[in-house]
Image (tube, rainbow, N blue to C red):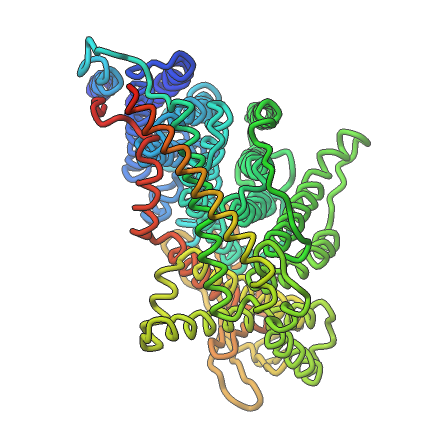
Amino acid sequence: MADLGRAALLLTLGLSVYALVAGAAAAALGRRRLAHSARNALYASFLSTLVASVVLVAGFVRDDFSLAYVAGHSSRDLPLQYKLSAFWGGQEGSLLLWLLILTAYASLAIWFARRRAADLVVWVTPVLAGIGVAFTWLLVAVSSPFDTIAAPADGSGLNPSLQNPYMVIHPVFLYLGYVGLAVPFAFAMGALLSGRTDERWIVATRRWTIIAWTALGVGQLLGAHWAYQEVGWGGYYAWDPVENAALMPWLVATAFLHSVMIQEKRGMLRVWNVSLVGLAFCLSLFGTFLTRSGIVSSIHSFTQSGIGPWFLAFVVIAVVFTTVMIWLRLPQLRTSARLESLVSREAAFLYNNLLLVALGLTILWGTAWPIVSEAVRGEAVVVGRPYYDFFLRIFGLPLLLLMGIGPLIAWRRASLRGLARVFVWPAGVALATGAFLILLGAGSSIPGLIAYTFSAFVLAAIVLEFARGTAARRALTGESVPAAFGQLIGRNRRRYGGYVVHASIVLLAIGVAGSSAYDSVAEGRLARGESLTVGDYTLTYRALTERDGANATEIRALLDVRRGGEELGTVSAGKNAYSAEQQVSNEVGIRSDLLTGEDLFVIAEQVRDDGAVFFRVFVKPLVNLIWLAGLVFVLGSLITLWPDAREERRLATRYARAGEPADRPAT
Amino acid sequence: MTVWLVLGAALAVALVVVVALPFLRDPAPSSDSLHELTAAERERLEAQEARDRALAALKELEADHRAGRVSDEDYRSVIGVVRRDAADALRRLDRVEGARAGGAKSR
């Protein structure tokens, strides 16, 4: 079976090289059939990669330990869902997943754009194929998942940290995000290569960018929840290099999604937009380099190998290529439109962009600092949490405020008197919230208080937007409130979907501020019957249990939970000892109060032979709003992504002449 | 092992056929050149984009004013420019389409 996997990957390499060379030749020489053939090669590369992936999945399901990758990441007693997720549990499988998603995205993006932007797609094909060649080369020549060995009786198992339901879907979402950024990058580069710098590359990639950005955001939240439940230190984000690697391209893609609106509305920022798309893609490659090279220490780097230099070369090529292309096309990208006022929606979006990119680059600097310091001083210096927290406050809090200001300012210019009228309600709500929170004692954390006040401002602005829009629509059409509300969203999906996404970011900010600025912690060694108090909670250690699970011995300490004299039930925390992997993992106990969003979080740090346990217990106010934010975020993205038939008809009319003539055969 | 290699070879043949399909379907085309937008078509496309942008700006400004997001004062200071942009964009598109229709008639 390994032969079929190897053959399929070799085929993908051949097809990608053909799509790159034939596609570039067809574009340069204007050859129609060759261009279609290159495009078909890209479609075919997805099929061959799919075959390779199916072979690897079959290897895991059938416990085929003659495949070194399967033997190194699975075992006979591993539950089926983890056998499937072990596919991306190591480096070779992760690279194969990267390639599978890339070829799928490439095929779909080109298929959907082939009529509306035919002359652009001709140039996009070789760019996507070039990215495919790089990844297939790694899989064929450097790090193959189909290397064979003399089959051992059993595999060495999967890292216990990866035996978690979140690890079944978190990497897939993350890769859907990382890899998805290749689509806007390829179309932007295709536009630059072809000299077609009109808006078609933006229209063709709008949905793909939002899909990639949503997937990257959801992937990070799933990863945060995994870290919260599985890593067991009481947090969900630790500014780990691999976590930062996903955050950086997401921040830059967020900046692009805002600045591209300025190009669509005002025809401005064309150089900035292609630069952001290039930066987002290069950062996604850099993220993969960080994750896979082992160059920086991370709890998320489950494999380390020698593919680092290959990736670094790939990042350098992408950066140089992007820079050269933008420089060559600068005259075509320049526009006559100018910013008319510093108080306007485009100016607010520009401030938002500068803050997002500044935050992204600050994180990049902190993440790369160990590499830089080692190169310069011979000693790797790791940047700590205070560095990141400082810049998150400096750039993040103004960003939060701008989320409320930006959508309410008029395009072109706005007077201060007009602004005061528009902002009177949100500002009033924010000030009242701030004062109320001070009375409640929230002034113990100034950044937390500011975050909550700004959050109140943004939420009030969003509610006001929906209310004003619905009222205006009712006045115009006489519809009922629900009908007007539904039509308002249905006819302005990008705008109101965007507001829902903003609401999710506010929920996230409230959850992060609550759980980090106002949390409490207590720790201590307890014998059976002893109690520990943290916040309003009292925990009493009752019993210690031990049982054999599917592939691990599970030890659990059971604690009774009381709050203010009220019995709340029990919570258990402990450890799992994995026999095949010879590793022990922390299994935390979490009791969530869905009404207040608060978590009681229990870690059994040490279990002694005499039955005494050293516990660390956190109370995390509002932390569940972070996970709720994820659901609202997906809802907002879906509203934004939902196809608009009127918009599609308008674009079809506009681009009818840009597609292929009807008399040409479709191939 | 042989079965898997045969399957791999069959996959290779099938995918090569997919890649060769444009040449197999259309072995002797009357023209093999790519459809490129002419200068006139590109100008029309840009004029359409400018028109859509200007009309969308006008529509959004009217909606924002109606909803109370834009004050009367701000509306008055901007509406003239936005209307002028829309009129310029429509005139430009008319000119481009007129030139195209004229060109087609003269042919």
Using residue A37 as the reference point, say whether residue A570 is left or right of it: right
Residue occupying the point 32% across, 31% down:
A657
Instruction: Farthest residue to the right: give it.
Output: A377
Using residue A602 as the reference point, say whether residue A59 is left or right of it: left
Residue occupying the point 33% across, 34% down:
A116
Q: Specify the quadrant of the image occupied by residue A110.
A: top left
| Vertical relation: A619 (above or below) A552 | below
Q: Is residue A524 visible?
A: no
| Vertical relation: A101 (above or below) A481 | above
Q: Quadrant of the N terminus of chain A?
A: top left
Task: State the image coordinates of residue A409 (x, y, percent, origin top left).
Answer: 59, 62
Residue occupying the point 72% across, 38% down:
A370
Using residue A522 as the reference point, say whether residue A465 is left or right of it: left
The mark tally for this picture is 0
Task: State the image coordinates of residue A72 (x, y, percent, origin top left).
Answer: 43, 35
- The residue lying toward the viewer, choosing from A39 and A592, is A39
Task: State the image coordinates of residue A178 (x, y, percent, origin top left).
Answer: 49, 40
Q: Is residue A321 visible?
A: yes
Task: State the image coordinates of residue A388 (x, y, percent, origin top left).
Answer: 70, 52
Instruction: Farthest residue to the left: give it.
Output: B25
- The residue lying toward the viewer, choosing from A625 and A181, is A181
